[in-house]
Image (cartoon, grey):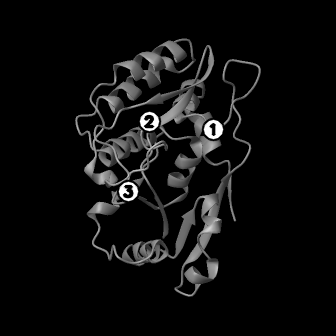
Amino acid sequence: MVLAVMQPYLFPYIGYFQLIFAADIFLVYDDVSFIKQGYINRNTILTEKGVKRFTVPVPGASSNKMICDLDFSRDVRKIKEMVRQSYSKAPYFDQVFPLICSILEYRERSIADLCIYSYQLIFDYLGIGKEMIKTSDIDYDRSVSARDKLISFCRTFSADSYINVPGGRALYSRSDFSERGISLKFIEPVDVVYFQGGDEFVPNLSIIDLLMNCSVSKVHELLRSYRLA
């Protein structure tokens, strides 16, 4: 059983979706502090004028509040119009734009619930089934270290493998996990390049850009373009 854990991000880049894809169970880490100026409620797309950031407001957002206690605003008109203007001529606009609107207009406004809905809807569009669970719904010791919380999650779900993003190399030791019967691996995207309509490829944009420009089969190919080390 392979487990991965990550804070909820709105329309993250493909590396986030590769992490979900590589795991049997994906935990959305929502009972931790909200990070302002991060990617929880914003990301970037490609417009006629270049890369542009979009943000969905989170009323009352503060680093003193947990993600699970915060909601997205219902005012999503600007981002919908930005996406429409930016990708109206993209090859898969007709299929993907309604999906993006459905996510932005989702009735449940909590950050984690809306993000999970977005991941599930995107994987459904791709014909891939994934299991996702909020950590706020799990009974575990919240007073222990970040490492021990991850080990606890692995034990709860009988996972013998935990996958982390490359940044985790500076935080976690393989030996700390292996001593507890868990294999720690790190995921890194490779060769994630696709046609965006211009001459120069712009990497690490929101998944919106990839979905608008790529067929389902191409997205499948790119989802598998990673290595575990």
Q: Circle 2 sits in a helix, a strand or a loop, which is it?
A: helix
The answer to whether 209 appears left or right of 118 in the picture is right
Q: Position of residue 158 (x, y in %)?
A: 42, 76
Count of numbered circles in the view: 3
Q: Which amino acid is tagged 1?
A: Asn
**Image: 48 above or below 56:** above
Q: Nearer the viewer, mark 2 or mark 1?
A: 1
Q: In percent of the image, x 62 and y 15: which residue is there?
A: 49
Outermost residue on the left side: it is: 107
Q: Which mark is residue 33?
A: 3
Q: Which mark is residue 125?
A: 2
The answer to whether 140 appears left or right of 20 in the picture is left
Q: Which mark is residue 204?
A: 1
Q: Position of residue 187 (x, y in %)?
A: 63, 58
Q: In percent of the image, x 53 and y 47: which residue is there?
A: 17
Q: Quadrant of residue 25?
A: bottom left
Q: In percent of the image, x 60 and y 28: which residue is there?
A: 214
Q: Which amino acid is tagged 2?
A: Tyr
Q: Which amino acid is tagged 3?
A: Ser
Q: Nearer the viewer, mark 3 or mark 1?
A: 3
Q: Circle 1 sits in a helix, a strand or a loop, which is it?
A: loop
Q: Nearer the viewer, residue 185 or 123?
A: 185
